[in-house]
Amino acid sequence: MAMPETAVILAAGLGTRMGGRPKGLVRVAGREILYRTMTLLKRNGVERFVIVTNERYAPLYKKFIERHGFTAELVINPEPEKGNGHSLHLAEEKVSGKFVLVMSDHVYSEAFVEKAIGGNGLIGDRRPGWIDISEATKVKVRNNRVERIGKSLKKWDAVDTGFFVLDEGIFNVTEELEREKNGDYSLSEVVERAKLPVTFVDGLGWTDVDTPEEIKRARRMLVKTAVKGIGDGFVSRHLNRKISTEISAFLVDKVTPNEMTAFTFALGILSALLTLVSLPLAGILYQLSSILDGIDGEIARASLRTSRLGGYIDSILDRYVDGSFLALLAYSTLREPLWYLVALLALLGSVMVSYSTERFKGAFCRDAYSEVPVLRKLPGKRDERVFLTMLFLLYPVSVSIKALFALLAVLTNLRVALTLYFISRKVSQPKTI
């Protein structure tokens, strides 16, 4: 099925509840709403954009297009006080075939756009998690098509996400309404009269931004839905991410991913140096650095600033922190040569846990946790090791330190061995045709 190559964005509203600012240019998680929508659509095959706006905001949108280099043209709505169905009609001469229609004040997660763009008609959500249902436009569906649509519906089947995949046949409906209502009609009226098909995209991240208060909700949604998660260990899933995402939602408009990477690295090195002074404090700071370690990635994904270089550098710095911590911990607590060997095995194993999966990606250009899901359940990932280390250091006696090194040595090297085993089985399996 052909994917749409053009998107129409309705941005003619006057933004009265946003203090007269064009809502599409409001920044959420460090990016303009329109930049986020257009970038995500571009990643999914949309090559050109038609922005319907008013005369007042047209110069601002023109500067925005030039600054970011989008292939886009403006259509001026001289009567923005009329319903947004009229704004859609004004784009008739600019599109042909299949196209995407979105609102300038809706914020979408990457996962939502990836799925919605493959749909047809109105994209509805039966499990919306980031909107006020009482303010949402609800849809009653019959035979997989819109039967009724409106905010006041008592019985409904889905919520209108403001995302549509249409074709030029929709303009037959707008032309009828232009004649009947003198150009003053809503998009909901167009949708209901057209009896659009409905595609359900349930429970993914999206929301609209009509007031300054809703910016905070959109920011939090973007951070929460930006968690990669597939490689997280038990501690990250149940503790670290719950804390880090709250911090990221607060910081996403204030710091860059690189600044957080540098700060977390410095905190990790400080925790290693504190093993020479106070083991309980060193353990607590080590765990804190582990919690904060997820923030740079969360901010990068939420603000669309991810880069392979950033992930590469972050991974290397984590190895330096872990190596420094275990080396200095061994130096400050161990005396017998045998236990230095155990500590060395723990240090090597800790490094190899990450290397064994990263090397798979380098060799086969695929993610190990996606290709071999059983690896997600193996204990010994970094977040789990750091948390264990903190627990053992809260009551630092000689026996507990030795037990920690022994446990890390066994746990990490066993995990590496199992990783090699499961990956070897996966790679050696014959491909089915």
Image: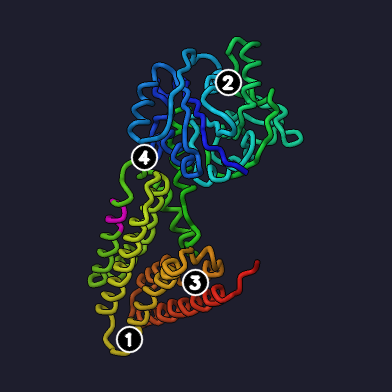
Tag 2 residue: 85
> Can you say whether 317 is above or below 162 in the image?
below
Secondary structure mainly formed by the magenta segment: helix
> Amino acid under label 2?
Gly
Callout 2: 10 Å neighbours few (<14), some, many (20+)?
many
- The first of marks 4 and 2 along the sequence is 4
Q: Is residue 328 left or right of residue 7?
A: left
| Cβ atoms under marks 1 and 4 closer than 8 Å | no
Give me the disc on residue 379.
3
Give me the disc on residue 31.
none
Q: Element type at marker 2?
A: helix
* Front disc: 4 or 3: 4
> Observer-nearest residue: 11 or 203?
11
Give me the disc on residue 30.
4
Callout 3: 10 Å neighbours few (<14), some, many (20+)?
some
- The first of marks 4 and 3 along the sequence is 4
> Observer-nearest residue: 337 or 424?
424
Residue 397: image x %, image y %? 33, 79
Q: CA distance from mark 4 to mark 2?
A: 30 Å
- The first of marks 2 and 3 along the sequence is 2
* Front disc: 2 or 3: 2
Tag 1 residue: 341
Coloration of the structure image? rainbow
- Say if residue 217 shows up in the picture: no
Residue 261 among those drawn in magenta? yes
Highlighted magenta segment, given as a residue range:
259-264
| Cβ atoms under marks 4 and 3 closer than 8 Å | no
Residue 323: image x %, image y %? 30, 72
Callout 1: 10 Å neighbours few (<14), some, many (20+)?
few
Q: CA distance from mark 1 to mark 2?
A: 73 Å
